[in-house]
Protein backbone atom coordinates (compact mmCIF):
# COMPACT_ATOMS: atom_id res chain seq x y z
CA UNK A 1 0.00 0.00 0.00
CA UNK A 2 1.47 3.34 -0.98
CA UNK A 3 1.94 6.05 1.61
CA UNK A 4 -0.70 8.77 1.78
CA UNK A 5 1.41 11.95 1.81
CA UNK A 6 -0.19 15.21 2.91
CA UNK A 7 0.94 18.74 3.73
CA UNK A 8 0.26 20.01 7.24
CA UNK A 9 0.74 23.74 7.79
CA UNK A 10 1.42 24.88 11.35
CA UNK A 11 -0.41 28.17 12.00
CA UNK A 12 -1.72 30.22 14.89
CA UNK A 13 -2.68 33.79 15.72
CA UNK A 14 -0.71 34.01 18.99
CA UNK A 15 2.80 34.71 17.69
CA UNK A 16 4.75 36.41 20.48
CA UNK A 17 6.69 38.84 18.27
CA UNK A 18 4.07 39.60 15.60
CA UNK A 19 0.59 38.53 16.80
CA UNK A 20 -1.89 37.76 14.02
CA UNK A 21 0.82 37.81 11.35
CA UNK A 22 -0.69 34.92 9.34
CA UNK A 23 -3.77 37.02 8.54
CA UNK A 24 -1.91 40.24 7.80
CA UNK A 25 -2.17 41.58 4.22
CA UNK A 26 0.74 40.37 2.14
CA UNK A 27 0.27 40.49 -1.63
CA UNK A 28 -2.52 41.21 -4.12
CA UNK A 29 -5.26 41.60 -1.46
CA UNK A 30 -4.30 38.26 0.08
CA UNK A 31 -2.99 37.47 3.53
CA UNK A 32 0.36 35.94 4.36
CA UNK A 33 -1.26 32.54 4.94
CA UNK A 34 -3.33 32.65 1.73
CA UNK A 35 -0.19 33.47 -0.26
CA UNK A 36 1.52 30.40 1.18
CA UNK A 37 -1.52 28.15 0.64
CA UNK A 38 -1.90 29.28 -2.99
CA UNK A 39 1.66 28.10 -3.55
CA UNK A 40 1.19 24.77 -1.73
CA UNK A 41 -1.95 23.95 -3.73
CA UNK A 42 0.25 23.80 -6.85
CA UNK A 43 1.65 20.49 -5.55
CA UNK A 44 -0.53 17.85 -7.21
CA UNK A 45 -2.41 14.98 -5.53
CA UNK A 46 -1.63 16.13 -2.00
CA UNK A 47 -4.14 17.14 0.67
CA UNK A 48 -3.30 20.40 2.47
CA UNK A 49 -4.36 20.76 6.11
CA UNK A 50 -3.88 23.80 8.36
CA UNK A 51 -3.24 22.68 11.94
CA UNK A 52 -3.95 25.35 14.54
CA UNK A 53 -4.73 25.20 18.22
CA UNK A 54 -7.91 25.15 20.30
CA UNK A 55 -6.95 28.50 21.82
CA UNK A 56 -9.85 30.95 21.44
CA UNK A 57 -7.75 33.48 19.54
CA UNK A 58 -7.65 31.01 16.64
CA UNK A 59 -11.45 31.08 16.15
CA UNK A 60 -10.99 33.92 13.64
CA UNK A 61 -8.32 31.93 11.80
CA UNK A 62 -10.52 28.81 11.57
CA UNK A 63 -13.46 30.83 10.21
CA UNK A 64 -11.24 32.63 7.69
CA UNK A 65 -9.90 29.33 6.36
CA UNK A 66 -13.26 27.55 6.30
CA UNK A 67 -14.75 30.40 4.26
CA UNK A 68 -12.03 29.73 1.68
CA UNK A 69 -12.63 25.98 1.57
CA UNK A 70 -9.42 25.05 3.37
CA UNK A 71 -9.19 22.02 5.68
CA UNK A 72 -8.61 23.05 9.30
CA UNK A 73 -7.67 20.95 12.32
CA UNK A 74 -7.53 22.28 15.87
CA UNK A 75 -5.48 20.62 18.58
CA UNK A 76 -3.15 21.30 21.50
CA UNK A 77 -1.74 24.83 21.83
CA UNK A 78 1.68 23.93 23.25
CA UNK A 79 2.08 20.23 22.44
CA UNK A 80 2.54 20.82 18.72
CA UNK A 81 3.74 17.25 18.22
CA UNK A 82 0.42 15.90 19.49
CA UNK A 83 -1.43 18.41 17.28
CA UNK A 84 0.39 17.11 14.20
CA UNK A 85 -0.25 13.47 15.05
CA UNK A 86 -3.97 14.10 15.53
CA UNK A 87 -4.25 16.28 12.41
CA UNK A 88 -2.62 13.51 10.36
CA UNK A 89 -4.81 10.77 11.82
CA UNK A 90 -8.00 12.77 11.32
CA UNK A 91 -7.12 13.33 7.65
CA UNK A 92 -5.75 9.82 6.90
CA UNK A 93 -2.23 11.15 6.30
CA UNK A 94 0.65 8.81 7.13
CA UNK A 95 3.47 10.81 5.53
CA UNK A 96 3.59 14.46 6.57
CA UNK A 97 5.18 17.41 4.82
CA UNK A 98 5.46 19.96 7.61
CA UNK A 99 5.29 23.63 6.70
CA UNK A 100 5.54 26.68 8.96
CA UNK A 101 2.94 29.31 8.10
CA UNK A 102 5.31 32.29 8.25
CA UNK A 103 7.15 31.33 5.06
CA UNK A 104 5.37 32.90 2.05
CA UNK A 105 8.40 32.21 -0.18
CA UNK A 106 8.02 28.45 0.29
CA UNK A 107 9.35 26.82 -2.86
CA UNK A 108 6.48 24.58 -4.00
CA UNK A 109 8.75 22.84 -6.50
CA UNK A 110 10.99 21.90 -3.60
CA UNK A 111 7.92 20.54 -1.77
CA UNK A 112 6.98 18.56 -4.87
CA UNK A 113 10.48 17.06 -4.91
CA UNK A 114 10.13 16.18 -1.22
CA UNK A 115 6.78 14.44 -1.84
CA UNK A 116 8.17 12.44 -4.77
CA UNK A 117 11.21 11.33 -2.77
CA UNK A 118 9.03 10.38 0.21
CA UNK A 119 6.94 8.11 -1.98
CA UNK A 120 10.03 6.35 -3.33
CA UNK A 121 12.03 5.68 -0.17
CA UNK A 122 11.32 4.42 3.32
CA UNK A 123 12.90 7.27 5.29
CA UNK A 124 11.46 8.40 8.62
CA UNK A 125 12.55 11.93 7.82
CA UNK A 126 13.62 13.85 4.71
CA UNK A 127 14.83 17.42 4.93
CA UNK A 128 16.78 19.99 2.97
CA UNK A 129 20.27 20.94 3.99
CA UNK A 130 21.80 24.33 3.29
CA UNK A 131 25.35 25.18 4.40
CA UNK A 132 25.42 21.72 5.98
CA UNK A 133 22.57 22.71 8.32
CA UNK A 134 19.01 21.34 8.38
CA UNK A 135 16.94 24.01 6.62
CA UNK A 136 14.42 24.07 9.49
CA UNK A 137 17.16 25.62 11.65
CA UNK A 138 17.80 28.45 9.19
CA UNK A 139 16.03 31.72 8.41
CA UNK A 140 15.72 31.33 4.62
CA UNK A 141 12.06 30.24 4.68
CA UNK A 142 12.16 28.30 1.39
CA UNK A 143 11.79 24.65 2.40
CA UNK A 144 9.54 22.20 4.16
CA UNK A 145 10.43 18.84 5.69
CA UNK A 146 8.96 15.35 5.52
CA UNK A 147 8.34 13.01 8.44
CA UNK A 148 6.27 9.85 8.82
CA UNK A 149 3.35 9.67 11.22
CA UNK A 150 4.92 6.52 12.64
CA UNK A 151 8.14 8.41 13.52
CA UNK A 152 6.16 11.16 15.25
CA UNK A 153 4.26 8.59 17.30
CA UNK A 154 7.56 7.04 18.38
CA UNK A 155 8.78 10.48 19.46
CA UNK A 156 5.52 11.10 21.32
CA UNK A 157 5.90 7.92 23.35
CA UNK A 158 9.56 8.53 24.19
CA UNK A 159 9.48 12.22 25.20
CA UNK A 160 7.77 14.24 27.90
CA UNK A 161 5.28 17.09 27.70
CA UNK A 162 7.16 20.39 27.76
CA UNK A 163 10.30 19.03 26.08
CA UNK A 164 11.67 20.66 22.89
CA UNK A 165 10.54 17.55 20.99
CA UNK A 166 6.91 18.42 21.71
CA UNK A 167 7.18 22.02 20.48
CA UNK A 168 9.60 21.54 17.57
CA UNK A 169 7.83 18.63 15.93
CA UNK A 170 10.69 17.03 13.99
CA UNK A 171 13.61 18.06 16.22
CA UNK A 172 13.94 14.74 18.05
CA UNK A 173 13.88 12.79 14.77
CA UNK A 174 16.73 14.48 12.89
CA UNK A 175 18.76 14.91 16.10
CA UNK A 176 18.74 11.11 16.60
CA UNK A 177 19.84 9.62 13.26
CA UNK A 178 20.80 6.36 14.97
CA UNK A 179 17.14 5.81 15.92
CA UNK A 180 15.45 7.29 12.84
CA UNK A 181 16.35 6.86 9.18
CA UNK A 182 16.99 10.37 7.86
CA UNK A 183 17.65 11.39 4.26
CA UNK A 184 18.81 14.80 3.10
CA UNK A 185 18.32 16.81 -0.08
CA UNK A 186 20.83 19.53 -0.89
CA UNK A 187 19.39 23.00 -1.29
CA UNK A 188 20.13 24.62 -4.69
CA UNK A 189 23.64 25.92 -5.34
CA UNK A 190 22.42 29.52 -5.57
CA UNK A 191 21.76 29.62 -1.81
CA UNK A 192 24.70 27.53 -0.59
CA UNK A 193 27.24 29.64 1.26
CA UNK A 194 24.73 32.44 1.78
CA UNK A 195 23.91 33.72 5.24
CA UNK A 196 22.29 37.00 4.27
CA UNK A 197 18.79 35.88 3.25
CA UNK A 198 15.92 35.98 5.74
CA UNK A 199 12.44 35.45 4.33
CA UNK A 200 10.84 33.70 7.26
CA UNK A 201 8.60 36.20 9.05
CA UNK A 202 8.89 36.73 12.79
CA UNK A 203 8.89 40.52 13.11
CA UNK A 204 7.32 43.58 11.49
CA UNK A 205 10.66 44.32 9.77
CA UNK A 206 10.68 40.81 8.31
CA UNK A 207 7.15 41.34 7.00
CA UNK A 208 8.00 44.66 5.33
CA UNK A 209 11.09 43.23 3.65
CA UNK A 210 9.26 40.13 2.43
CA UNK A 211 6.33 42.13 1.05
CA UNK A 212 8.64 44.36 -0.95
CA UNK A 213 10.71 41.47 -2.36
CA UNK A 214 7.62 39.41 -3.19
CA UNK A 215 5.67 42.16 -4.95
CA UNK A 216 8.74 43.37 -6.89
CA UNK A 217 9.51 39.83 -8.08
CA UNK A 218 5.89 39.07 -8.99
CA UNK A 219 5.84 42.21 -11.13
CA UNK A 220 8.74 40.78 -13.15
CA UNK A 221 7.79 37.10 -13.22
CA UNK A 222 4.67 35.49 -11.71
CA UNK A 223 6.60 32.20 -11.34
CA UNK A 224 9.84 33.57 -9.92
CA UNK A 225 12.47 31.08 -8.70
CA UNK A 226 14.91 30.93 -5.80
CA UNK A 227 17.61 32.11 -8.19
CA UNK A 228 15.46 35.17 -8.94
CA UNK A 229 15.21 35.90 -5.21
CA UNK A 230 18.99 35.68 -4.79
CA UNK A 231 19.63 37.90 -7.82
CA UNK A 232 17.09 40.46 -6.58
CA UNK A 233 18.72 40.68 -3.15
CA UNK A 234 22.17 41.07 -4.64
CA UNK A 235 20.79 44.02 -6.61
CA UNK A 236 18.99 45.57 -3.62
CA UNK A 237 21.68 45.97 -0.98
CA UNK A 238 19.44 48.02 1.33
CA UNK A 239 16.95 45.17 1.68
CA UNK A 240 19.78 42.67 2.13
CA UNK A 241 21.38 44.85 4.81
CA UNK A 242 18.08 44.98 6.70
CA UNK A 243 17.84 41.17 6.50
CA UNK A 244 21.37 40.73 7.84
CA UNK A 245 20.48 43.00 10.75
CA UNK A 246 17.31 41.01 11.45
CA UNK A 247 19.24 37.73 11.28
CA UNK A 248 21.67 38.94 13.96
CA UNK A 249 18.77 39.98 16.22
CA UNK A 250 16.69 36.84 15.75
CA UNK A 251 19.02 33.86 16.00
CA UNK A 252 17.33 30.47 15.64
Image (cartoon, grey):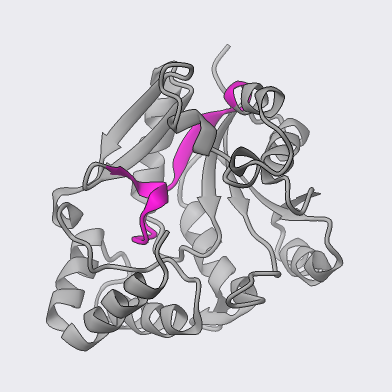
Give the side of residue 107 with respect to residue 27, left or right.
left
Nearer to me, 81 or 65: 81
The residue drawn where x is 33% and y is 41% is: 128
The residue drawn where x is 39% and y is 30% is: 116
Q: Position of residue 2 (x, y in %)?
A: 54, 16
Q: Position of residue 172 (x, y in %)?
A: 53, 33
The vertical placement of 54 against 221, above or below, is above
| Magenta span of residues | 133-151
Image quarter in which the N terminus is found: top right
Hey, which residue is sitting farthest bottom in the picture? 238
Nearer to me, 212 or 238: 238
The vertical placement of 113 against 188, above or below, is above
Q: Quadrant of residue 163?
A: top right
The residue drawn where x is 40% and y is 50% is: 137
Q: Is residue 33 visible?
A: yes
Give the side of residue 78 with respect to residue 204, left or right.
right
Q: Position of residue 191 (x, y in %)?
A: 19, 56
Q: Is residue 140 magenta?
A: yes
Give the side of residue 245 with respect to residue 147, left or right.
left
The vertical placement of 238 against 139, above or below, is below
Amino acid sequence: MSMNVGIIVQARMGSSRLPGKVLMPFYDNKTLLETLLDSLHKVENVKVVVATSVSKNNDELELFLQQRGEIVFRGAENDVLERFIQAAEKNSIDGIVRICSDNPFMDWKGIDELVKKARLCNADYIGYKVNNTPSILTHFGFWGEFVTLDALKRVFHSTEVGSPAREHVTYHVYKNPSEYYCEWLEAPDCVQGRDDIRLTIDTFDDLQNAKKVYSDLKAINKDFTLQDVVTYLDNHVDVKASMVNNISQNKK
